[in-house]
Amino acid sequence: MHKYLEIFKSNLTVITLIFYVLGYTYLAMYYFQFDISIVNYINLQDILFTAINSLVVLILTYLFVEFGLYIIGIFILNTIFQIFIKRKFLKKLGNNPRVQKYLKFRNEKYYSANIEGTTLFLLVLITFLLLYFSDEKALIFSLFIPFFIIKLYRITPKEKGEMQIQLNQFFLGLLTFTFILCFAYWGYKDGTTTKNSKNGQQIEFREQGIAYNTKSDSLNFIGETNEYLFLYNNKNRETLIFSKSGINCLKIKDTSPTNDEKKAQEIEAQRKMNDFFEKIKQK
């Protein structure tokens, strides 16, 4: 851990610059869908936290997937070791404490030598299955390709001296370039989705005596920065930009259903199901 902290500290400037590039790429492609030159409305804090929020979600997702891959990988390796390797040694050398101790050592070496390759194979297999069955092929590919590069780096034999430095720089450059493309795609996709459908967040405020409410079918909240708030008018196909300093009485409504509303929805769903089965019986 201390080694990784030292690497992070020594490359803090480069890492921060990468964060800025990723954040700006996402924001630029997102607001491009609304004909907004977002560079005029953002600051470095907006860019940095956009990148951090996305990367935190990615890291948590990758850790969850990695944990699942390791569980499956250990099960597969254990099955192979028990059926093929252990049985072969027991048949050849017999079953005694010395052989069991040796098998335990071989088992640990077997796991450490093969677990990374096995999880990489599983990642590729799962990715291909998702690409085959999913309609969101570009999204699946963009989510898994950075993870694939990270996994590929981990199984690459480590060199010494200048060769390892060059190898690290290559993978860092490749990963950064891949992330830039992915963030550009995610921004474009999120912007397109928000433009074509309601995002469900309901806000209302007044600006220069005029009331605005996204409860209206024509208005949709599309985003905000530290200093500006953006609405999209679906009817007129125009983007409204408001300076937060000129906004009064800003309200953000919680649109999630209450417990009573959930119960009412369950009752209504049950009623519709009963009516459906009743019609079947009558036929």
Image (spheres, rainbow, N blue to C red):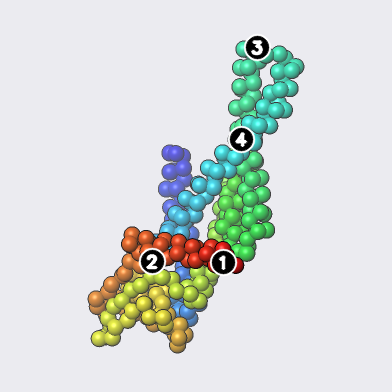
Residue type for callout 3? Asn
Residue type for callout 1? Gln
Residue type for callout 2? Asp
The numbered mark at residue 282 is 1
The numbered mark at residue 46 is 2
Res. 252 image quadrant: bottom left
Sequence-wise, which precedes: disc 3 or disc 1? 3
Residue 270, compared with residue 81, is above or below; it is below
- For the residues labelled 1 and 2, the Cα–Cα distance comes to 61 Å
Res. 269 image quadrant: bottom left
Total numbered labels:
4
Q: Nearest the camera: 65 or 266?
A: 266
The crowd level at tag 2 (other Cα within 10 Å; few <14, some 14-19, many 20+) is some
The crowd level at tag 4 (other Cα within 10 Å; few <14, some 14-19, many 20+) is few
The numbered mark at residue 96 is 3
Sequence-wise, which precedes: disc 2 or disc 3? 2
Residue 168, compared with residue 82, is above or below; it is below
Task: Point out the frontmost of discs 4 and 1.
Answer: 1
The numbered mark at residue 75 is 4
Q: Residue at x 50, y 76 (%)?
A: 196
Disc 3 secondary structure class: loop
